[in-house]
Amino acid sequence: MSQEPSSKVVELKATPGVNAGAQGVEKLRPQVFRRRILLLSFLVCVLCPTILGTLYFLFVASDRFVSSAGFAVRSMDAGSGTDLFGTFTGLANAGSTTSDSYILLKYLKSRAMLEKLERDFPLREAFSRPDIDVISRLDPQSDIEHVLDYWDGMIDTTYDNISGVMTFSVQAFSPEDARQIADLVLSYSTELVNDLSERARADALAFAEDEVRLAEERLRTATENLRAFREAEQSIDPTRSAEVQIQIVGSLEKELLDIRARIAALEGTVDADSPALQTLRRQEEALRRQIEAKQSQISRGETVMGTSGTALSGLLATYEALEVERNFAQQAYASALSSLEKARIEAGRQQRYLAIYETPAVPEYPLYPRRILNSILLAVVLCTIWGIGTLIVYAVRDHLS
């Protein structure tokens, strides 16, 4: 009877140990579950996409051939070809070749260039052939905006601020298409630079040409006014006419003084009714009237026939004003012509052109896609993203717990 209680005691002592082991197993189950979830996420997010991507790059992705060209925008004026301010600051001067290079850099990926390329080359057909893989293939029914995005991935441009050298590379799914597209892009770039140069030249000459037209019109108006004045007054040069009239009055006054001197000499020696003295006095009166008539003609514009006209002093003032205006207009016209010639020389020195040092060639080997490198990069990127996501999840779980 004494053995029964002891067995009961043993059973009671063994029961707590069993319960503790069961509780330990229950505590280990969430850790195993989390490890399995972590492994599953790695398989789904990293391993499977890496395998699929590698299979795509190795066996499905279509070969892409690259044709490139290199050139630089240069100016006829060697001194203006280098923009030191733009080189060290990255800011382009409006009158330098740097600004034209940046314009050309934007133009290579612009819609205007793409539309011109589509007119000269079957671009949609070349990038939507059935032998191209689905991911790289262009939908032939795409709108121009999506085609422009697709083209942005098929052309690569670089520009060196120091040397001003620009290069572009065109990708295509056949060597001939790559070379042909690169040739067209290079020709469009040449046309753009020539057009920019011509417009800059026209803008530089426009102001000088306008000044020449204004000066020419002013000179024409001044010459016409002077001609109309001469026809109205029937005098080629009123200045010379005035000089002649003044000379005539001077000679008459000289002759009058001579007559008066003879009269004064005879008055003391002959009778007052002497025929010789009377003759001299009649000559004196005639000369005096003639001088007054000439002076009246000069001052009031009375002609010999008795008609009235403009006073000679007024004619001289009008003629001198017209002559000064004509001379000034002639000098202004000559100055405008000189400025136009200088502007033409300066515009010729600032003319831009495309200095090509590398022309497009037919590629012999597809440079893209870089199958092994792309597969490795895909694996690295997926691992990085998965690792960051895992750290974020654990950090949030620890924060909530």
Image (spheres, rainbow, N blue to C red):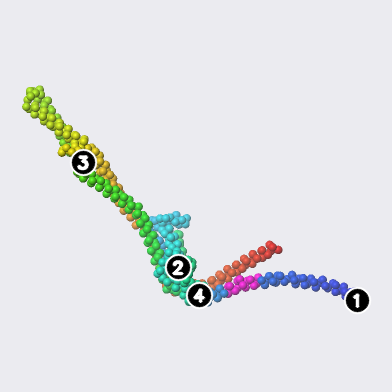
- The answer to whether residue 317 of the structure is visible from this angle is yes
Residue behind mark 3: 238
Q: Position of residue 133 (x, y in %)?
A: 50, 75
Q: Position of residue 76 (x, y in %)?
A: 36, 58
Query: In screen coordinates, is 156 left or right of 391?
Result: left
Name the amino acid type tagged 3: Pro
Residue behind mark 2: 169
Query: In screen coordinates, is 106 left or right of 295?
Result: right
| Highlighted range, magenta | 38-51
Q: Cβ–Cβ below 8 Å for labels 4 and 1? A: no
Dot 2 or dot 1: first in sequence order is 1
Q: Nearer the viewer, residue 81 or 229?
A: 229
Q: Nearer the viewer, residue 64 or 260?
A: 260
Dot 2 or dot 3: first in sequence order is 2
Q: Nearer the viewer, residue 13 or 115?
A: 115
Which tag is nearer the camera, tag 2 or tag 3? Answer: 3
Residue drawn 41% across the image and 66% down it: 116
Name the amino acid type tagged 1: Gln
Dot 4 or dot 1: first in sequence order is 1
**293 vs 392: above or below:** above
Which tag is nearer the camera, tag 4 or tag 2? Answer: 4
Q: CA distance from mark 2 to mark 1?
A: 98 Å
Residue behind mark 4: 133
Q: Cβ–Cβ below 8 Å for labels 4 and 2? A: no
Residue drawn 66% across the image and 63% down it: 396
Q: CA distance from mark 2 to mark 3?
A: 78 Å
Q: Position of residue 12 (x, y in %)?
A: 85, 72
Residue behind mark 1: 3
**Neighbour class for label 1 at 10 Å: few (<14), some, many (≥20)?**
few
Query: In screen coordinates, is 9 left or right of 205?
Result: right
Q: CA distance from mark 4 to mark 1?
A: 86 Å
